[in-house]
């Protein structure tokens, strides 16, 4: 996809009004994400809604630019994605170590981890954005929204593309809202018996997932199907027929299937993701080293006074500043860990524990930033199994603490669990930001943004998010508490990811973790890596099954990922048709714009829904999640919804083909090509 190249000279990009607007959007989106994440375990992507709102507001100014709009969405998306820290920090309440969220301590943990994530992302941009063909579905979608909204591109493409994005947005938004009224449903699923046990099939009827699938491609989609089959055709049926597990869980078949997935399949998936992550890191070490080398060359050019002659793609924050910030960050991290670990057994051996933990943060941060960036490029930041990375992080620090303090028990074990969660929270800040940053930097590449300005915007987004998140967490903890915490209320929030990460820390340090599940997942990961490499070598790299995508398929719940392969297959068929059309490149871009609209509509309505839920909670509603419900669920709702959803998607694809099929062929005077001026 061609980038948008702006003419040379001064353009408005990192402006005061853009920073202020990004900060204001941050407050709203971060609050909504924190609440939804704790309530139901999901968050929504903030890049695209921020881009749409930014364009709507900045259109009032005559001198706004696409690059300025990009800065606004960058700030808002950085803060919005940082809200995923809720997958770890509430664990300190759940294990009974904190009773609230100390403001400045929480700000420091979130902020320092996030800034480290930005710094680690600088050399990764060269390795994983400009140096690869990863699809970056949300980054591409955000760029398409910005380009169409700013009138970039040929007149005919812009006119048709705007109609397609608008139409798909309306359909996606309409279905989302109607589903919340219960006239339709946004979930479809059934639990069924398999032998003496059971399994399930379920899907979130999410048009955004269809759009993501279209953008990530069929290889990723099919690899995810393999992972889903491993979980739902083998792991879950096996454990629901295991006599010991059945006796432990009890309850009905649905509860048994759910427990088998959460307690068994997810641990297998974490092992697969771990092996695939290590293999991915080994493969991208070369590009990362090359990126660092080119950053050093660019730094020498700046010092020689030739910085203005550097290509736009080389204008990152100077690598010397990046390295300095990373190393200096280890000082406050060490002080934070020292202050936190002031109880036994850590207080008896603080020096060794703090030094080892700081070193772990430094090294694990590099690994996790690279892996999360790759996962985001492969499948998108919203669908990346970030909590799986949290599991691997807490496993690592917990094993270190077991080695340093063998044989502890009682309150000392509790102190080590809390310390492991605190260290994981810092690393998780790195993970969440690197998971999102490279999407933003991909958007920036496609709209010709200046990398260093966008990286500064990312830091600002982290600061805004770090300041906003702790009081929201404290407010929710006071109002609702968290499930499993001492003194939890009946209205306690589930915080499912924080619960599983806390449970794993307790399992490792208490000696009760079932390591056989991790080993099984690791073996699956090894096989997946071998199969992928054989396929690529025998097919000339035309066929491959990304091992990380297989791990995601095992780890993620079906409703979060089942429709991605459907979208990938639909996109594959559409692109095959596009290749035979009068103007193949134009037709393919029209498909991208339609898929983008599917993501935009649901993302925008996610904000509206979150606001409605929050308002209902404030008003004292006992069923705030169904605040928009107009009717009680009726027997045929699932069938009706499947039909309506399928017809809507089919209609959108046929409409897109009709909009693209009669486009003038390239070279036709009625269809002038998009021109890019030199910069």
Image (tube, rainbow, N blue to C red):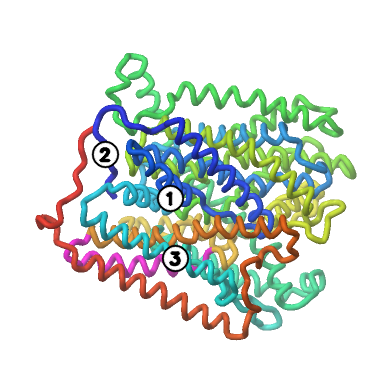
Give the image quarter of residue 422. top right
Judged from the image, the secondary structure of the residue bearing numbered disc 3 is: helix
The residue that disc 1 covers is 52
Q: Is residue 308 left or right of residue 213?
A: left
Question: Distance from label 1 to label 3 (Cα)?
Answer: 20 Å
**Which of pointers 1 and 3 lies earlier in the amino acid sequence?**
1
Q: Find residue 495 and report its horizontal and vertical position in percent.
A: 71, 55
Name the residue located 49 percent from the left edge and 26 percent from the top edge.
Answer: 322
Along the line of sight, the residue nearer the viewer: 212 or 130? 212
Name the front one of labels 2 and 1: 1
Along the line of sight, the residue nearer the viewer: 364 or 433? 433
Residue range highlighted in magenta = 561-584
Name the residue located 50 percent from the left edge and 41 percent from the top edge.
Answer: 370
Q: Is residue 186 left or right of residue 623?
A: left
Name the front one of labels 1 and 3: 1
Name the residue located 60 percent from the left edge and 57 percent from the top edge.
Answer: 610
The residue that disc 3 covers is 210
The residue that disc 2 covers is 5
For this orientation, the residue located farthest to the right is 410
Q: Find residue 445 and report its horizontal and vertical position in percent.
A: 35, 41
Give the image quarter of residue 525. bottom right
Question: Distance from label 3 to label 2 (Cα)?
Answer: 30 Å
Judged from the image, the secondary structure of the residue bearing numbered disc 1 is: helix
Examine the structure image and report whether residue 576 is included in the region drawn in magenta. yes
Q: Residues within 10 Å of mark 3 (few under 14, many from 20)?
A: many
Evaluate whether residue 291 shows in this view: no
Q: Is residue 347 left or right of residue 458?
A: right
Q: Find residue 507 and report its horizontal and vertical position in percent.
A: 77, 52
Judged from the image, the secondary structure of the residue bearing numbered disc 2 is: loop
């Amino acid at each position: 996809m061609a980038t948008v190249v702006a003419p040379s000279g001064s353009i408005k990009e990192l402006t005061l009004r853009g920073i202020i607007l990004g900060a204001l959007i941050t407050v709203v989106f971060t609050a909504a994400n924190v609440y939804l994440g704790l309530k139901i375990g999901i968050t929504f992507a903030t890049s695209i809604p921020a881009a749409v709102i930014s364009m709507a507001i900045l259109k009032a100014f005559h001198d706004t630019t696409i690059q300025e709009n990009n800065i606004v969405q960058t700030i808002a998306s950085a803060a919005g994605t940082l809200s995923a820290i809720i997958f770890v920090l509430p664990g300190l309440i759940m294990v009974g170590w904190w009773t609230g969220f100390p403001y400045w301590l929480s700000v420091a943990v979130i902020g320092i981890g996030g800034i480290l994530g930005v710094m680690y992302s600088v050399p990764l941009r060269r390795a994983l954005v400009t140096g690869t063909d990863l699809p970056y579905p949300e980054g591409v979608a955000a760029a398409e929204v910005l380009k169409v909204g700013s009138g970039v591109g040929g007149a005919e493409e812009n006119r048709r593309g705007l109609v397609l994005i608008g139409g798909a947005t309306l359909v996606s938004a309409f279905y989302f809202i109607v589903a919340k009224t219960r006239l339709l449903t946004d979930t479809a699923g059934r639990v069924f018996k398999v032998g003496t046990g059971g399994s399930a099939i379920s899907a979130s009827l999410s048009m955004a997932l269809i759009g993501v699938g279209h953008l990530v491609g069929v290889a990723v989609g099919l690899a995810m199907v393999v992972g889903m089959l491993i979980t739902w055709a083998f792991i879950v049926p096996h454990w629901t027929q295991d006599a010991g597990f059945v006796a432990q869980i009890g309850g009905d078949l649905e509860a048994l299937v759910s427990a088998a997935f959460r307690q068994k399949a997810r641990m297998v998936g974490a092992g697969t993701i771990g092996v695939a992550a290590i293999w991915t890191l080994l493969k991208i070490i070369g590009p990362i080293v090359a990126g660092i080398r080119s950053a050093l060359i660019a730094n020498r050019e700046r010092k020689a006074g030739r910085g203005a002659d550097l290509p736009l793609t080389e204008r990152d924050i100077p690598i010397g500043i990046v390295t300095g910030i990373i190393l200096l960050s280890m000082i406050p991290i060490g002080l934070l860990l020292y202050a936190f670990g002031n109880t036994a057994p850590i207080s008896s051996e603080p020096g060794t524990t703090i030094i080892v933990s700081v070193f772990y943060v430094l090294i694990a941060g590099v690994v996790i930033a690279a892996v999360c960036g790759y996962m985001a490029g492969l499948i998108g930041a919203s669908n990346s199994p970030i909590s799986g990375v949290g599991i691997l992080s807490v496993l690592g620090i917990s094993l270190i603490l077991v080695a340093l303090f063998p044989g502890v028990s009682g309150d000392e074990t509790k102190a080590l669990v809390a310390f492991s969660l605190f260290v994981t929270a810092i690393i998780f800040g790195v993970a969440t930001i690197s998971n999102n940053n490279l999407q933003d930097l991909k958007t920036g590449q496609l709209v010709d943004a200046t990398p260093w300005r966008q990286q500064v915007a990312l830091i600002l987004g982290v600061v805004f998010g770090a300041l906003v998140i702790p009081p929201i967490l404290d407010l929710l903890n006071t109002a609702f508490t968290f499930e499993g915490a001492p003194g939890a209320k009946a209205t306690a929030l589930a915080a499912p990811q924080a619960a599983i990460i806390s449970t794993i820390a307790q399992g490792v340090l208490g000696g009760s973790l079932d390591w056989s599940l991790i080993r099984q997942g690791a073996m699956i990961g090894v096989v997946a890596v071998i199969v992928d490499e054989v396929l690529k070598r025998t097919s000339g790299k035309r066929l491959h099954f990304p091992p990380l995508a297989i791990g995601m398929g095992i780890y993620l719940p079906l409703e979060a990922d089942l429709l991605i392969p459907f979208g990938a297959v639909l996109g594959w068929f559409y692109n095959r048709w596009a290749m035979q059309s009068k103007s193949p490149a134009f037709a393919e871009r029209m498909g991208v714009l339609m898929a983008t609209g599917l993501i935009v509509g649901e993302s925008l309505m996610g904000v509206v829904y979150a606001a409605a839920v929050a308002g209902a909670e404030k008003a004292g509603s006992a069923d705030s999640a169904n605040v928009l419900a107009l009717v009680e669920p009726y027997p045929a709702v699932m069938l009706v919804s499947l039909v309506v959803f399928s017809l809507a998607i089919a209609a959108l694809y046929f409409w897109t083909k009709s909009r693209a099929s009669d486009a003038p062929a390239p070279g036709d005077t009625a269809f002038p090509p998009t021109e890019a001026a030199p910069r």
